[in-house]
Amino acid sequence: MAFDPIERSFYVENVVMSGNKRKYYRFRHSLHYGGIVTADAVGCNLLCAYCWNYGRNLHPERFGEFHTPQEVARRLTDISRKVGYDLFRVSGAEPILGERSAQHLVEVMRLVGGPFILETNGLMFGYKPDLVDLFASLNVSVRVSVKGWDEESFEKVTGAKGEFFEYQLRALEALHKRRIRFWVAVMDEVFKGKGLERLRKRLPVPCRIEREPMEKYPFVVENMKKRGLLKQGDS
Ligand code: SF4
């Protein structure tokens, strides 16, 4: 049964935030974006079939440890000095679950100072556009991972009620209105065929679309099959 992702945001934010601390389980560097320093968090308001961090996001209470923005920024800048990358992000989870998690991230970004890529599904930006204002003066580019091209495909991919697809589109409008740099990312495996064309017709503002290849971990393939996004026999 599909769930309400706004209710889930509030629930998950309570699990993964304690005061101004958020739960993270790993700090690393990766080759994405040509080299980026990454803090991996837990907790999301969606449960996408292709999520590579599905288990941790299904049960965020079981994983990670709480860190203040100061601790997160120190871990990120230490790695940056060692590996020479000066681009930063939070990955593995939804960073914006409500006001507290948004403020935590703003503080991390201010302390790190360097350019930050904010990877988000945009749901809470669409629900509460005031949250976008918090990021307006920061050195940030926002990558909005759009989950479907209509209500039905959104529900199939995320497990959340289709009517909330609208919030992803509202997030794009809110970012555009505030002149914050952003683009849309879609999962190629899901959008191939007519999906991309259909999404273009629904986009409320002009934006670049990145096509992301799917990591075919066995549990991802299983989840995709269960949701009817891959046929039995596909691998
Ligand atoms: S929005 Fe991202 S982090 Fe959340 S479940 Fe989907 S893929 Fe995972």
Image (tube, helix red, strand yellow):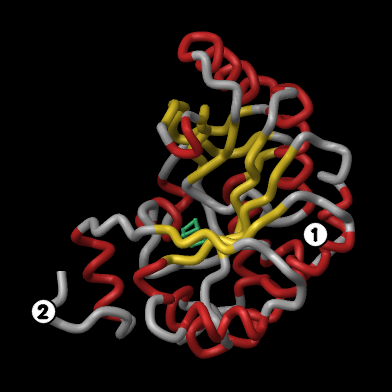
Q: CA distance from mark 2 to mark 1?
A: 41 Å
Residue 4's place in the image compared with 30, above or below, is below
Q: Amino acid at mark 2?
A: Gly
Res 145 → quadrant: bottom right
Which comes before the other along the chain, label 2 or label 1?
1
188 relative position to 145: left or right: left
Q: Position of residue 55 (x, y in %)?
A: 35, 55
45 relative position to 54: left or right: right
Q: Which mark is residue 175?
A: 1
Neighbor class of circle 2 (other Cα within 10 Å; few <14, some 14-19, many 20+) is few
153 relative position to 133: left or right: left
Q: Tell me the SS state at disc 1.
A: helix
Q: Position of residue 99 (x, y in %)?
A: 79, 52
Q: Which mark is residue 233?
A: 2
Q: Position of residue 143 (x, y in %)?
A: 62, 53
**Residue at 63%, 21% in the rendered image:** 71
Instruction: Name the residue nearer the viewer: 117 or 109.
Output: 117
**Residue at 47%, 51% in the rendered image:** 60
Q: Position of residue 112 (x, y in %)?
A: 70, 23
Residue 142's place in the image compared with 117, above or below, is below
Instruction: Name the residue nearer the viewer: 217 or 179.
Output: 179
